[in-house]
Image: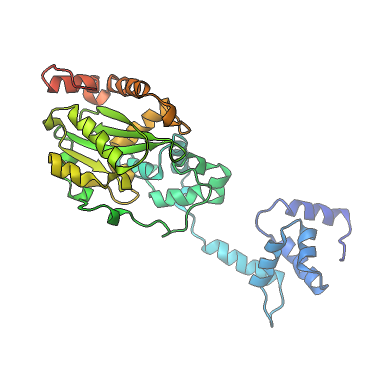
Amino acid sequence: MHHLKGKIVYELTFRLMAHKILVYEERKIIEKELLRKTSCRDIAALLGRDHSVVSREIKLNSGEHMPYSADRAQLYADRRKKGKRKKVLEENEALRNMVIEKLRDEWSPDQIDGWLREECKKPPGFVSYETIYKYVYSPEGKEEKLWLHLRTGRHKRRIQGARKSRCDQIPDRTSIHERPEGINLKERYGDWESDTVESPKSGKGGLSSHYERKSQTCRLHKLQSKKSEETKEALVKTKDSFPDYLFLTVTFDNGSENVRHTELKKEFGIETYFCDPYCSWQKGGVENLNKLIRQYFPKKTDFSRVSEEAIYAVQEKLNNRPRKSLNYRSPNQVVSELVGGGATNP
């Protein structure tokens, strides 16, 4: 191996090691060392680079009848850099900071997408949930470990298209887009949203969380598993705690625990609707409820160790909080007024 001599050259090489992308000075060294027949690994060691970086650089910019040229390689690199379109979250610092803040608050990319579209129609603007996912798994997002704040907690994203839609598993499924506009506008009471809050490991149980869209009242039921029969039983318990006119519809996501929704329709005349695949923000009320629940039962909670009494206590704490949107009445007060001052069953 031919050694470079001199203090100036040494300092130059040391400085270049800090760069993530090869620069012109490094390309000149690669060209010079290739003429000397220096191996790819030795050139990489000389530059303080991984050998794969140097190998890729040589393959990309040389061929059988085209020896490696630093000038030509730099020209191609500049063209690629110029043609690369800046991504929206790289370009818009205010929007990027807002997205990162919401991710760290345990909001999902779906929720951030939906919230931005509804609440931030003015600058800094909005961004799609797919773009947020891409940023989370980009080098910048990984450096900030944003994936730790996702519900799955995966450090590596599944290959696009690997997730199969679960819609086909749900019989007699009615899309949320067919839901009457009166429900969307919260014109009446009795329209619910349902979701599952899981323990970190399977077999450790969870919660079936239910949220009434207009009164904002909630019901929480302990689950031993995520089986559809248990989810149905939890919903029946919630239905039985209210008069029939306060339990008219339920909106679900596409989880397999919701396949027995047809039995709710047949046995009780309850209409059911389903969100689009991977768009849980479309039932934002129960998603926000789950966020509040996590203040009491963090993500690592083993629900098999949590008592029914503790779950009920959290439920009633939430139901007794005054809400600005209810003119600072609590959900329990609203429901009590609706049933003529009579208390509902827990």
**How many circles with numbers are drawn on the protein?**
0
Expressed as whole percent of the image width and height from the top left, the position of residue 267 reads: 14, 41
Residue closer to the observer: 247 or 292: 247
Q: Is residue 131 left or right of residue 251?
A: right
Residue closer to the observer: 141 or 275: 275
Expressed as whole percent of the image width and height from the top left, the position of residue 275 reads: 27, 47
Expressed as whole percent of the image width and height from the top left, the position of residue 133 reads: 45, 49
Q: Is residue 141 above or below residue 5?
A: above
Q: Which residue is pictured at 14% across the width and 19% down the height?
A: 337
Q: Is residue 131 left or right of residue 272?
A: right
Q: Which residue is pictured at 68% across the width and 63% down the height?
A: 52
Q: Is residue 71 left or right of residue 337?
A: right
Q: Is residue 20 above or below residue 304?
A: below
Q: How is the image coloured?
A: rainbow
Is residue 23 among the parts visible in the rendering?
Answer: yes
Expressed as whole percent of the image width and height from the top left, the position of residue 310 reads: 37, 21
Examine the image and state in which quarter residue 181 appears.
top left
